[in-house]
Image (cartoon, grey):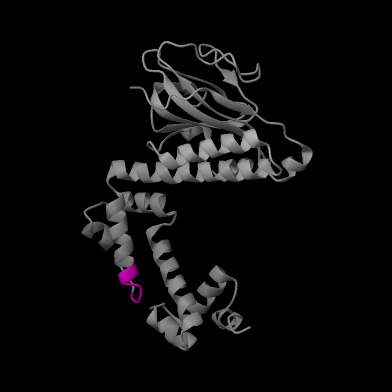
Amino acid sequence: MRYNDLGIDIKYLLVNERDKKFGLTVNTVGFQPVAQNSLYPSTEHPKSYYFKPDKGRILSEYQILYISKGKGYFQSDSTKKTTIVKGMAILLFPGQWHTYAPFKDTGWNEYYIGFNGEIIDKIVSNGFISPENQVLKVGVNEDLVTLFSTAIRVAKEEKGASQQHLAGIVVNILGMLLCLAQNKNFETKDSSQKIERAKIIMAENIHRNIDIKGIATSLGISYSLFRKDFKEYTGYAPAQYFQELKLRAAREMLAETQLSIKEIAYKLNFSSYEYFLSFFKKKVGYTPLEYRNLGKV
């Protein structure tokens, strides 16, 4: 029995000037099942989207493709020819040459959504996604399929503010892809459990100074690799993460206890009271006393 072989479901959308002011607009969204030995891509696509896989194409928009079944390939001017299997997502960038297609003997099922806007431009400029890392291993995920299916339904209903609804779905899809890809990467490298253990050690020793290199040694990992993986996993270097834990604890104590500011600095083992004051002001934007008084307003 064959599953997930619903018919082609594609919607192309109009975008007005007011929609563009929102910061992200969707041009197309769809689902396309490609059976074994069938024509690809479908001739139902308009000229601006249709392409021949042997020649490739260049789009004027971003696209996200998610393969839920089957196997094929992808190649771009920044990515060598790569085999694509179910559970992989492909990020396409405007102005970039690329090509992709399912293998004839397998076919595939693809979900996709195309979009533009300053929101996605900023996400790219801040390095969250890039043409140098445009194939993401995220696994087969029902929630992703549901998001794409919801986007198709919203696009076809064409209700008021549908573009804004679709923009939210795009950000949701992208955020989920990044989260799934990062965690999938750590599952493969078997690093996540060691980093989680390191986080627990830090949390349990918040009231003292700790030896970051000693944690790496106790976990059986070199410090350089530990630091690299820890930052990739949490977004912080280990020492910075520990300081952020101390800062969070300080904020909680200021808001929820009657301890003096000096007592809080002492309990959290800051090197000096003066350092605590400057550290807190730099991170929070208020002195500890100002922060405490905010809660009394």
Residue pictured at 41% horizontal, 18% vertical: 107
Question: Does the rendering let one see residue 40?
Answer: yes
Q: Residue at x 71, y 43 (%)?
A: 160
Question: Residue 88 sits in which quadrant?
Answer: top left
- In the picture as drawn, the residue positioned furthest to the right comes out as 17
Q: Nearer the viewer, residue 216 or 33?
A: 33
Q: Quadrant of residue 246?
A: bottom left
Give above or below for 132 relative to 2: below
Q: Which residues are magenta?
A: 203-208
Side (left or right) of 187 relative to 138: left
Residue 140 on image: x %, y %: 38, 36
- Residue 202, image x and y in percent? 33, 66
Residue 266 lies within the magenta run: no
Q: Is residue 234 left or right of residue 201?
A: right
Horizontal relation, residue 166 to residue 78: left or right: right
Q: Measured along the vertical axis of the image, is residue 21 above or below residue 270?
A: above
User: In this rendering, does residue 81 appear at all?
Assistant: no
